[in-house]
Amino acid sequence: MERSVKRPRGKARNTLREMRANYVAYLFIAPFMICFAIFVLGPVVSATLLAFTSYDSVQAPQFIGFGNFVKMLTQDVVLMKYVIPNTIVFAVVVGPIGYTLQFLLAWLITQVPRHAKKGYIMAIYTPSIAGGVLISVVWAVFFSSDRLGYLNDLLLNLGFIQTAQAWTQDKAYLLLIMILVTLWGSMGVGFLSLFAGMQNVDRQLYEAGKIDGVNSSLKELFYITIPSMKPQMLFSAVMAIVGALKAGSIGVQLSGKNPTPDYAGQLIQTHIEDYGFARFELGYATALSFALMLAIFILTRICFRFLGTKEDE
Amino acid sequence: MAEKKRRRITVRYALHRLRHIKASTVVILLLLTIVAAVSILPIIYIISNAFKPLSELFLYPPRLFVRSPTLQNFYEFFYSTDVSAIPLSRYIFNSLFVMIVTVAMTLIFSSACAYAFSKMRFPGRKWMFDMIIIALMFTPEAVVITRYLIVSNLHMINTYFAHILPHLALPIGVFLMKQFIDQVPDSLCEAAKIDGANEVRILLNIIIPTVLPAVGAVMIIAFQNVWSDITTSTFYMVDESMKTLPYFVSTLSNALAVASVARKGAVAAAGLLLFLPNFLIFAMLQKSMIETMVTSGIK
């Protein structure tokens, strides 16, 4: 049936006829695709369009060409001085390091006896479902500024500090704390996918590998496991990139302020919300969104390059 | 009796196995146990805090485990809405209603869509599914502004539609389901078709029962997506009576972030109540989730 689509003569009419013959398929995909069009495609397309306008939500958008992007590069001091450096540091640590951590933990879990696996997965996955509310409750208290905070208590007792520190209000520590807390909660769907992929590698490959001289677990990992689970690695890489770049609220949750103290925890996402909902510069805010989506898209494409399966494989 | 005996044998077998465990495995176990402990500690903390009486909450030095557990914090939480106009039951109702409808509709929408993508041939099938794969990297956070504009232009502000519909556009649900349905042999569907079953029948009677793990996984993801979400309440609801439970809890805890400990116990109790369903659902469906993630790979 697929072949008939490619027939050159009367292609359009053929396609129409085939669409009519398969109308049931469209009925099946319609409910999802309509929601998808309205709430995924719609926002992306309109953000792309609004990015080239000046818009304050009261008057109609005015087309200003690349004005917003010029402003981004030349006038937005906070963006250049704090937001971009913060976002890069945050994303580099949470993305690649978080991903490596996920991979290592998943691999370690595959090495333990079967009965223990479930417990470890549960324990390591659980933080990712804790949700924003719980994160701010738990960690705000852990890093609490008075001596009742666990970190303060611990460090006071050990003699590292003399007085209680306001960790989440301190520009020297806020970003670090955000990174740690995000890493803690990042072992989600991507981590499960890596684990499942590893579990599922064909046993026979290892047997065959032994004959060919793949004799240590490390060699097995590089020569057999990783090549066999590229698709899962790609999936979780996409999840890791998105997770690292979309974060924003965490700094606000931990410090209780937007903007965060001295902009120390300001990420691109917080910046977008600041411009969109506090200053109502919607054109500029969507230009920032557009830049963020572009960054995510380019990074994921790079991962597809490395981990994607070629057509003939 | 037989159950007990079998368990005894398993235990003896496990002990027997234990003697043959390699040194490297012991190191790995140790390492993993440390990581697992660090992961789970904050959760234990919140559980413990939820049951602490006031005297223990302000105890110095702070103690991780509760000594004399009490339900005081839960009462405190339930009465915390007394001063506001909206009763707590309203938030709970909103949350439950939105969650149930969203999860049910996500399951229906994504299984129907995934079935069509997997088993039917129609023009546009390839590029539409490619689009869904690209959309895996979509994050609602990035386009929070234009999403708001769309919801507001559709006049959905302050309605349940704004709570539910945005959550239904869940590309990962369709993606996981489709990957799993791909494994069901086409011949099974064709045989049913010859027997005179229509597509809806095939989906309900053949596909769904064979892809139950994927149904479980999508259920977990849809649930997590909606249950602790506060963005729809924050951005799309103006009327306080339309907001959900996590939003209410977050307003309680916002004060807490700025170092005040006034409602520490009540917030811990509320946090626990919010978290528990999440945890239980994953604990029950962990196996389906892992089974589904095997097919999660992007080729």
Image (spheres, rainbow, N blue to C red):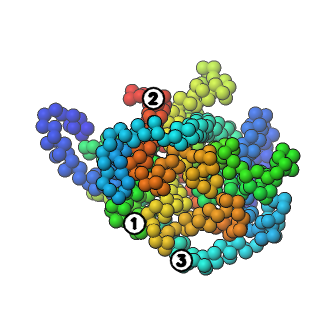
Is residue A41 visible in the rendered image? The answer is no
Q: Check if mark 1 and mark 3 are on a common chain.
A: yes
**In the displayed structure, does residue B64 sit left or right of residue B236?**
right
Query: Based on the displayed image, in which of its 4 quarters is residue B124 positioned?
Result: top left
> Percent position (x, y) of residue A120?
68, 47
Q: Nearer the viewer, residue B164 or B31?
A: B164
The residue to which callout 3 is attached is B86
Q: CA distance from mark 1 to mark 2?
A: 42 Å
Secondary element at image label 2: helix
Secondary element at image label 1: loop
Q: Residue furthest top?
A: A213
Task: Specify the label residue A77 is tagged with.
Answer: none
> Percent position (x, y) of residue A28?
31, 55
> Percent position (x, y) of residue A56?
38, 54
For residue B273, above or below residue A290: below
Q: CA distance from mark 1 to mark 3?
A: 19 Å
Which amino acid, by three-letter code, is at mark 3? Ile
Task: Specify the label residue B157 is tagged with.
Answer: 1
Q: CA distance from mark 3 to mark 2?
A: 53 Å
Residue displayed at 30% across by 45% down:
A63
Chain under callout 2 = A
Task: Specify the label residue A305 is tagged with.
Answer: 2
Secondary element at image label 3: loop
- Nearer the observer, disc 1 or disc 2? 1
For residue A76, above or below residue A146: above
Which amino acid, by three-letter code, is at mark 2? Arg
Q: Residue furthest front?
A: A75
